[in-house]
Image: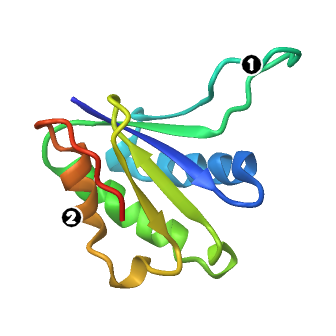
Amino acid sequence: MATARISVLSRDPIADAESLTDWLRGEPALAGKVRLDGAGPEPGQLGTALDTVTVLLGAGGPLTVLASCLRAWITQPRRSDVRLEVRRADGSGVEIDAKRVRGEDLEGLLRRILDDGPDQDVRE
């Protein structure tokens, strides 16, 4: 089972990651497969910043649904300066820019990086 780790690169990445998590959790095909994570606390910090959305993907449909949901979320007018970094468990990934997402084959990008296969680093 593939895992997509999505970081939101924006002015307020924590709030935007929470918003994206809520958006994805609203999709029935992704029910129970979405969680908000973060790295451990830095020295001197009391807690963890929950700034990464993790989505567990099975075979077939969930990747298509994830691509559709990401496109809908990122193309909202107030997100014109947002970028998403989508990585697999081994760290390889792709960056998706809201300014270019309309013309991109988002599902194709996600398939290239998230489908099981040889590790690769795809940067767009």
- The quadrant holding residue 14 is top right
Q: Name the residue located 45 percent from the left edge and 80 percent from the top edge.
A: 100
- The quadrant holding residue 42 is top right
Where residue 31 appears, as percent x and y from the top left, is 40, 40
Name the quarter where the N terminus is drawn: top left
Q: Is residue 13 left or right of residue 106?
A: right
Query: Tag 2 or tag 1, which sits nearer the N-term?
Result: 1
The residue identified by callout 2 is 108
As helix, strand or loop, the secondary structure at mark 2 comes to: helix
**Circle 1: is it few (<14), some (14-19), or many (20+) Cα within 10 Å?**
few
Say which mark, if any, is on residue 41: 1
Where residue 18 appears, as percent x and y from the top left, is 66, 46
**Circle 2: is it few (<14), some (14-19), or many (20+) Cα within 10 Å?**
few
As helix, strand or loop, the secondary structure at mark 1 comes to: loop
Question: Label 1, label 2: how many angstroms apart (C-alpha)?
Answer: 34 Å
Amino acid at circle 1? Pro
Where residue 60 appears, as percent x and y from the top left, is 13, 48
Where residue 15 appears, as percent x and y from the top left, is 74, 50
